[in-house]
Amino acid sequence: MGRRSDMENEQRPIEDRLVEIIASSDYQGIKFGDIVQLAEKSGVSRATVARYLDRLVSQGMVKKDGGYKLAMEAVNSKHAQRSLFSVLAMHLFDDIVEKAGQGKLTDEGFTKLFVDRVGVLAMYTLLVGLGKAGRHPEEAGRWMEEAFGTLIQKDGWRMCLNRQLFGKVVLLKSPVKLEEPLRHKIEIKDETIYVHLPSAIQPGSAAKVIKELPPIPDDRLNLLKGCLKRLYPKETELLDGAVNIITEAVAHSKRR
């Protein structure tokens, strides 16, 4: 394995490569050995990885908790830009959350707004990705895979639906403990803008919240489903067909 040249270090600093590796891990973080294995493919030695990881931890950009996780990122990191966009884009739904929580939206009005906003966000995100395809195809692919349909966005969409179903802000039966920070935070340090991304929403968070919700009213759920079918009959028919195919396959599999 050859060492990185000075030009390689200048074009793609080691810190950036390590941040990218850690950012690609799941919510549990990534172990030192796995980081070394991936970094060595870019010509970064084990000793260099250890030295730069210590530096990132001391700077507060990375935290060590069993594995290594990102605590904050410089905003010029591509991962930070995609993640921050996925958070800021949810302001598209601010008025829906507010009005649904006050019972001000009819089911039809809510359904039209919700479907339109999700569609706009999906198309906008994909167009941003496609706009990068010519010069940066890998980054284009990451925008399509990582900037839409994120856990934070799904949590916001769940909140919209919960409020419409109940016609008010829904109170949990018991509080759910979430990791800090709950919201994104931006700070300037040494003339660099850093982004602290939310850690509250992780895989399994939705189930924790759902367990503490009051019982979902079936009549309201069926009314919303019916509203969706009236407004989008062809689309829901296709999706119902997909669900039916899966249901039949499961039943057939059990018989065997």
Image: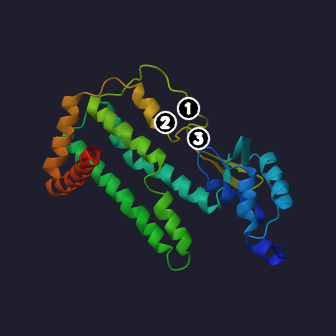
- Spatial distance from mark 1 to mark 2, Cα to Cα? 8 Å
Return the mark for residue 205: 2
Q: Helix or strand or loop: what does disc 3 sit on?
A: loop
Residue 6: name its quadrant.
bottom right
- Residue type at numbered disc 3: Ser
Residue 47 locus on image (x, y percent): 86, 59
- Spatial distance from mark 3 to mark 1, Cα to Cα? 8 Å
Residue 210: name its quadrant.
top left
- Vertical comparison of 196 with 172: above or below: below
Circle 3 residue? 199
Q: Nearer the viewer, residue 203 or 91?
A: 203
Q: Residues within 10 Å of mark 1 (few under 14, many from 20)?
A: few
Q: Residues within 10 Å of mark 3 (few under 14, many from 20)?
A: some
Residue 50 locus on image (x, y percent): 83, 54
Q: Nearer the viewer, mark 1 or mark 2?
A: 2
Question: Is label 1 in contact with label 2 (beta carbons under 8 Å)?
Answer: yes
Circle 1 residue? 178
